[in-house]
Amino acid sequence: MKKYEAIRKQLLARREELNKRVNKLSNSARHIDEPLTPDFSEQAVERQNDEVLTALGDVGRQELVQINRALAHIEAGEYGVCDSCGTTIPAERLEILPFSDLCVSCAEKQAVD
Ligand SMILES: [Zn+2]
C-alpha cells in the first residue's frame, strides 16, 4: 500500500482543509458568530448569503464523502481500481483526480448518460 502513500497524505491534508472550511461555513450560515440584522432588507441579503454559503458547504461535504471513500479504498487495498469495470486506473489520472473511482472510459460513459 506504500504505493499510494503520497496520495493518501494528500487526501488527508485536503480532508482537514475541507473540514475546517465546511465547519466555518456552517457556523456563519447559522449565525453563531453574529445574530441576524433586525433591518428587513439586510435580512434578505443575509439570507441570500446563507444560501451561497450552504451551497459552498454542500460542495465541500460532497468532496469529503469522495475523499473518505478513496481513503477507505486505500485502507482496504482496493484503491486505484475502477468501480465499474475493475481495470486499474492509471496513476496519472489518480494524480489529477485522487478520489476518482472510475477509469477514464467509464467516467466518460457516465458523463454521457
Ligand atoms: Zn472502468
Image: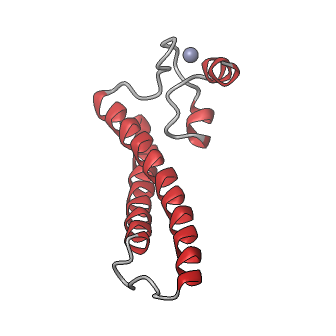
Say which of 20 and 100 sits in front: 20
User: x and y percent of residue 87 in the render?
Assistant: 52, 14
The residue positioned 43% from the left and 38% from the top of the image is: 4
User: x and y percent of residue 24 in the render?
Assistant: 41, 71
- The quarter of the rendered structure image containing the C terminus is top right
In the shown orientation, is residue 22 left or right of residue 94?
left
In the shown orientation, is residue 26 left or right of residue 98?
left
The residue positioned 50% from the left and 68% from the top of the image is: 50
Q: Which quadrant of the figure has residue 42? A: bottom right
The quadrant of the rendered image in which ligand 1 is seen is top right
Farthest residue to the top: give it: 85
Q: How is the image coloured?
A: secondary structure
Q: Which quadrant of the figure has residue 68? A: top left
The residue positioned 29% from the left and 34% from the top of the image is: 75
Residue 32 higher or lower than 38, as above or below? above
Farthest residue to the left: give it: 76
- The quarter of the rendered structure image containing the N terminus is top left
User: x and y percent of residue 30 in the render?
Assistant: 38, 71
Q: Which quadrant of the figure has residue 65? A: top left
Q: How many marks?
A: 0
User: x and y percent of residue 39 in the render?
Assistant: 52, 88
Say which of 91 and 50 sits in front: 50
Residue 103 higher or lower than 51, as above or below? above
The residue positioned 43% from the left and 70% from the top of the image is: 29
Residue 52 higher or lower than 58, as above or below? below
Farthest residue to the front: give it: 40
Say which of 105 and 112 sits in front: 112
